[in-house]
Structure formats: structure tokens, C-alpha cells
Image: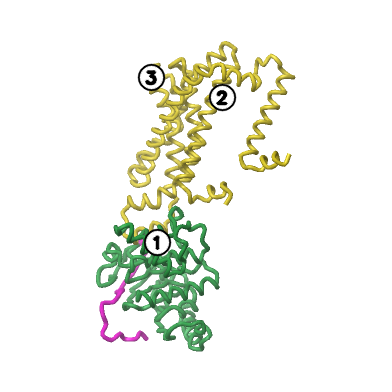
Amino acid sequence: MVAPSTSSPTPAVQVQGVSKVFNPGKSNQVEALDNVDLAIDPGEFVTLIGPSGCGKSTLLRLIASLTDTTAGSIQVNGKGAEQARLDQDYGMAFQKAGLFDWRTVAKNIELPLELMGWKSADRKSRALEMLELVQLAGFGDHHPAELSGGMQQRVAIARALSFEPSLLLMDEPFGALDEMTREHVQDELLRIWQDTKTTVVFVTHSVPEAVYLSTRVVVMSPRPGQISSMIDVDLGGRTEFTRDDPNFHTAVTEVRKALRAVGA
Amino acid sequence: MARLIDLASRPTAAPVLVGLGILAVWEGLLRVVSPDGFVLPPPTEIAAAFVENFDAIWTGATITGYVIVSGLIVGALLAVGAALLVNRFRIAHEAITPLAVAISAVPIIALAPIFNNWFGLTSARSKQFIVILLVFFPIFINTVKGLGLADPSKIELMRSYAATKSRITREVRIPTALPLFFTAMKVSSSLAVIGAIVAEYFGGRQDALGPMITQAAGLTRYADAWAAVLAGTLIGTILYVATVLIENAVMPWHSSVRTTDGR
């Protein structure tokens, strides 16, 4: 079902035979992932979806090297996941915006740049650019507590993208937003994705969100977590009419069926 | 009248009015019940004694104030240092935490006569030591708790940027711990005043606030004793206000700070 990529360059993410067991050998042992293979090409927008316990967040955190694999290997941009983390090859955004209350909005966006040793003037001009990108120009000196949830999440995206990583890892970033805000931020993310040619790996539990955003939906099944099917989504450029497009609904139905097959 | 209402609507006005009211009732009641002012002198007499003995009180306040402020600062530095170690290293946690709990269980003020023997009766050291031990535990335990409250997703985010552990402490853990640290500082500033004055009861320079109170009370010059107590109260109040000012300056983002200045 996966479209065979012609003239395949180095994959952005290469997951091979990856298993993850939590608390191995103990009574509360959990097989979170079992023998997962996944290759993601540069520029793809891949969504991981599945019922809770299917290991989609675990897979994302393994790619981010925030936790270690039990078996198998993960390559990011052709190098080991940990090396990619140390080289800051990816940006990350979580369900909670996770902004630092004690920093202004601009200083939040500058945080990864500070850690990379950027000069102050460069950081400031980049923060201004990023604020423009997420349409929050003029909010740089505000504190996060003064922003709405949707605005905070856009700041988190700006922060994740500030150093132009080639890979963006997002763990249910819009899960806490109301429907209106959510659709707005989705469009914003797609626009940024197209502008920056970033590869995105996106975890969600919303079928319409997965279909609307992705070029490919990866459906996962629980106990143990495995990839049960992959569905390519080809809806062309998204517009305000996309959500009413019959092809959109067909794709949504297809993903729903795949999820039902895994008992979701 | 309108001006009075306007005055009363200010946030600082209410406590001032209540305070003045209490003083007025105190004064009026004593004039009726106990005109000799033997047990409890009326506020006007205390104020008069304060003015009359101002030079002696000022000297006492500088001596005792030095013990309070230096003890509080040293105690806070030690407590924060220990808290950072405990948060960072498991071995430090296992070594320091039980010790800190044990120290907190000791009736520290009861050690004052012993410390006087250790450090010499007239030395400020013995009193400083009492203050340091008194303030250490509340600041230590609150700072440890605050450092541990750091949001795990913020720590993961920092790890995703390949941040070092000490960088994570600086960027995430310390800012998270600040509100609890300042709460502990407020509690500790009054503990420091109590500790210093009571420690002075057990000996030391006779011109400090503690001996001033015991001597005046021994001679039944209660107004003078109360005037010295007032000086201790003022030191405690100044420390409290200073802590709040520093807190507001260090944490402009903190929501409780924002609500108090009316936004």
C-alpha cells in the first residue's frame, strides 16, 4: 500500500525492527511496540493514529531519542536517533504547549537558539520572523499566560521550527484545542509545512485531523503496538473546501475502517 | 467624606484602617479597665517609650538586626545549595535529607546556652548559628519540593534540544521552584527574628534587643519592653516587605503577583 518512492534519498526517518518493552521482567511489563518498521521520506507529512496503548507516542519518543529502544534501530537523517538529538536535527511539540511562563513569547521561541549558541541579535531577528510565520507579530513581549490556548500552541510550533529543523515531531499538539481553533492551527501548520519543506511526524487520535494534514496515515494496533496498515492520502493542496470534498470523506472512511479492523 | 471613601477603596487602606482601629480599642479599653497600664501598657505609652529610648533601641536593633539578616542569608544560601544537590544527585538526597529532617526535629532554640559556650557569650556567632539552623529546614524542604515540581514535558523538551542537566536545572527547575522558595523565605524571616531575640535571652551583648526586653520586664518597665518588641516587629516587617519586593522583581510573570497589582 505504500507508494514505492522512486530515486529514494536518505530517509528522514528509518525505523527497523523496533521493539519497546517497559518494565521488562516485572509484573507490570508492557510490550509497547513489537517489531515496527517505518520509513519516512524527506518532505512527507506522516500521521500516526491508533487506539490508546498502540504505542504511537512511544514510537515518536523513540524517534526523538527521549527513550531507548529495546530492540531494533532508528536512523534520523542517516544517523542514530541519539546522535540526531544531540545534533538537534528535529524540533518537537507536545500536547501541552509547554511554554516557559517565566520567559516572554519571543524568549520562548529563542530558547532552542540560545542552547545552540546563537548570537543575541540573530536570535531576536529569527524570533520576529517566526512570530510573523505563525501570525503572532506584536506578541513577542507578552508572557504566555496572556495568550489563548491556540496562540500558545502556535508559539510552541514557532519554537519547534525556530532553528529550521528538517524534522518536526508532534505529539497530539492540538488535542487540547477547541474545534474552531484547531482547524485554524491545522491550516497554519500545513502552510508552514509547505513553506519550509519540513518532514513532519504527527501523532493524533482524530481521524479527520490525520486525513486533513497528512500525505500518509499510519494506522497502529495495540497489545503489542504494531503498524497494521498505511493509507496514502492524495487530496492535493488543502483549501477551505477540502473538508467537504468527497475524496476527503472517502479517505476518512478508509482510515476509520482500518481502525475498526484493529479493534478501535 | 468622598475623599475618605476614596482613601478606603485603596488596597493598602483597609489593613491600615483595621490596624488603627485595633490600636484605638486597645488604648480606650486600657484607659477604662487598667488605667495604671501595669500589665499591658496602652499604645501611646509604648510609642512614647519608643521615642524616649530611641538611641538605645536603634543600637539594639542594629546588633540584633545584623544577627537576623546575616543568619537568614547564610541559612538560605546553605538551604538552597543543599536543595540543588539533593535534587541533582541521588546520593546527596540519601545523605542530606534525613539529616535535615533530624535537625528540624531538634528544639533548636534550646541549644542557645550550649552554643554560647561553644562560640563565647558575647560573640554574635552563637545567635547567628541559631538563626541559620532555624531557617534552614523550611527553605530547604520547600526548595526541594519546588525543584521536583518541574513539568516533565518541559524537561523532555530541553532534552530534545540536547540540553545539559545543569542547563535544565537553570531553565526549568529553578524558575519552577521560585514561588515555593519565596513562601519559605517569608516564613523564615519571622522565624529569624524570633530565633535571634530568644537566643539573646540566654546571654550575649546586653545592648541587643533581647536583653533589653528581659531587663525592662524584670524592672517592670513594661512600656520599654514593648518598645523593644516593637523594634523586633519592625525588623520582621521590613524583611517581609523586602522579600515581597524581591519576589515581584524576580518573578514578574507569576500570576499571584499579577492579580495583586490589579491586572
Q: Is residue B118 above or below residue A111?
A: above
**Which chain did the renderer colour yellow?**
B
As for residue B28 lying within the magenta part, the answer is no
Q: Colour of chain A?
A: green
The image position of residue A236, as x and y in percent, is: 42, 86
Amino acid type, mark 3 = Ser
The image position of residue B228, as x and y in percent, is: 54, 21
User: Which residue is nearer to you in this view: A182 or A104?
Assistant: A104
Amino acid type, mark 2 = Leu
Contact, CB < 8 Å: mark 3 with mark 1?
A: no
Furthest toward the bottom, the residue is A246
Q: Which residue bears the numbered disc 2?
A: B230
User: Which residue is nearer to you in this view: A85 or B13?
Assistant: B13
Cα distance between the residues tagged 2 and 3: 24 Å
User: Looking at the image, is mark 3 or mark 1 nearer the viewer?
Assistant: 1
The image position of residue B108, as x and y in percent, is: 45, 27
Label 2 neighbour load within 10 Å: few <14, some 14-19, many 20+: some
User: Which residue is nearer to you in this view: B205 or B246?
Assistant: B246
Report whether residue A240 is seen: yes
Label 3 neighbour load within 10 Å: few <14, some 14-19, many 20+: some
Contact, CB < 8 Å: mark 2 with mark 3?
A: no
Amino acid type, mark 1 = Ile
Is disc 1 on the same chain as disc 3?
no
State which chain disc 3 sits on.
B
The quadrant in which residue A119 appears is bottom left
Q: Is residue A10 left or right of residue B51?
A: left
Label 1 neighbour load within 10 Å: few <14, some 14-19, many 20+: many
Q: Which numbered marker is on residue A109?
A: 1
State which chain disc 2 sits on.
B
Q: Main secondary structure of the magenta part?
A: loop
